Image: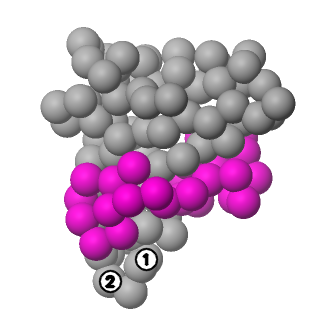
Amino acid sequence: MPSMLVLSIHATPGARRTGPAGAHGAALRVRLAAPPVDGKANAALLAWAAQAFALPRARVQLLAGAAARRKRLGLEFASEQELARAREQVAVWMRQGGADEIFKE
């Protein structure tokens, strides 16, 4: 049975490289090496999330925030174990408190 993780993201487009950059409030800050033009930053975010969580691109969705820095991603995992590993990884990226606040079921 698939398990869904909804992840709050604070996107920072136009960075040197794409990757997680700690916490921004209750969201995971992700720097994107793509400009916020013609959906390029959104595409880079979705591609990064798919690669970072070892998911097929079809299992990563932009749920909200297409034109905003604050976004919500939906990540579909095949098992509860994969979901738990993903939560642990996000908590590591956050590097400080607030990791539990970014998850919604």
Range of magenta residues: 46-72
Please tell me whether residue 72 is drawn above or below residue 7 in the rendered image. Answer: below
Residue 47 part of the magenta segment: yes
Q: List x then y, in percent, for residue 34.
A: 38, 70
Residue 40, numbered label: 1
Q: List x then y, in percent, for residue 103.
A: 42, 27
Q: Residue furthest bottom?
A: 38
Please tell me whether residue 44 is drawn above or below residue 3 in the rendered image. Answer: below
Q: Tell me the amino acid under the disc marked 1.
A: Lys
Q: Tell me the amino acid under the disc marked 2.
A: Val
Residue 73 part of the magenta segment: no
Residue at image location 43% in from the left, 30% down from the top:
104
Please tell me whether residue 85 is drawn above or below residue 27 in the rendered image. Answer: above
Residue 37, numbered label: 2
Q: Nearer the viewer, residue 4 or 20?
A: 4
| Whether residue 53 is visible | no
